[in-house]
Image (spheres, grey):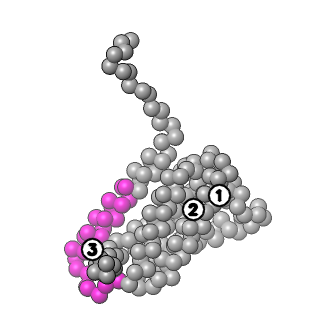
Amino acid sequence: MTCDILAIHHILGDPALQFALRLALASLFAVAAFHKARDLRGFAATLANYRTLPKRLVPAVAPLLVAIEAGLAVALCATPGSRLAPIAAVVLLGAYSGAIALNLVRGRRDIDCGCLGPRHRQPLSEWLLVRNAVTIAAAATLLVAAGTRPLHWLDAVSSVTSLAALALLWSAANQLMETWPRVRFVAAPRVDEPVS
């Protein structure tokens, strides 16, 4: 059991994995901040629609969230040994998940999640909670102390390749979440039924 825990710690603490995760999370927060900043009024309207904050606070909180996301993007890359940025990412993503869960419980699925700003409308769903849970787990992985082995050029190549693969996977998951509510399943005719 102790050997298994040490092996998991060794894998999670691998500098190449940590570097790739930092790049991926930094990219995610940078893209999210960019899209929200492009239409700050629209993002503020989306934030107000969650009904988790008093209306008078929304105009101040919307740009603050954009600044926090942009700051996290920088901090995740600029401070590789620090645990502050991963903790802040976990807290922020946890807060977003809490707001989504609260509105799902209220039955308010038709509102936009606001994840990538108001131009990329995506209704609330349980899949957003799953996606956020995976992202929180990735950020929490950065709390494991990184190993001391030096990074090589192959690590950089694999990290950038991993980032590209994760970006494609993220985009595909978002596309699936956007289109899934509109998908209608049509039952196939039974073998003994004539096809008209």
73 in relation to 180, above or below? below
**Left or right relative to 46: residue 176:** left
Residue 165 location, quadrant: bottom left
Q: Please identify, in this view, whether the residue under mark 1 or under mark 3 is nearer the observer.
A: 1
Residue 97 numbered mark, or none? 2
**Left or right relative to 135: residue 40:** right
**Magenta span contains residue 144:** no
- Name the residue carrying label 1: 102
65 in relation to 75, above or below? above
**Amino acid, disc 2:** Ser
Foreground residue among 1 and 15: 1
At x 50%, y 61%, the residue is: 132
The residue most toward the bottom is 148
- Name the residue carrying label 3: 156
Mark 2 or mark 1: whose residue is earlier in sequence = 2
**Magenta span contains residue 167:** yes
The magenta stretch is 146-169
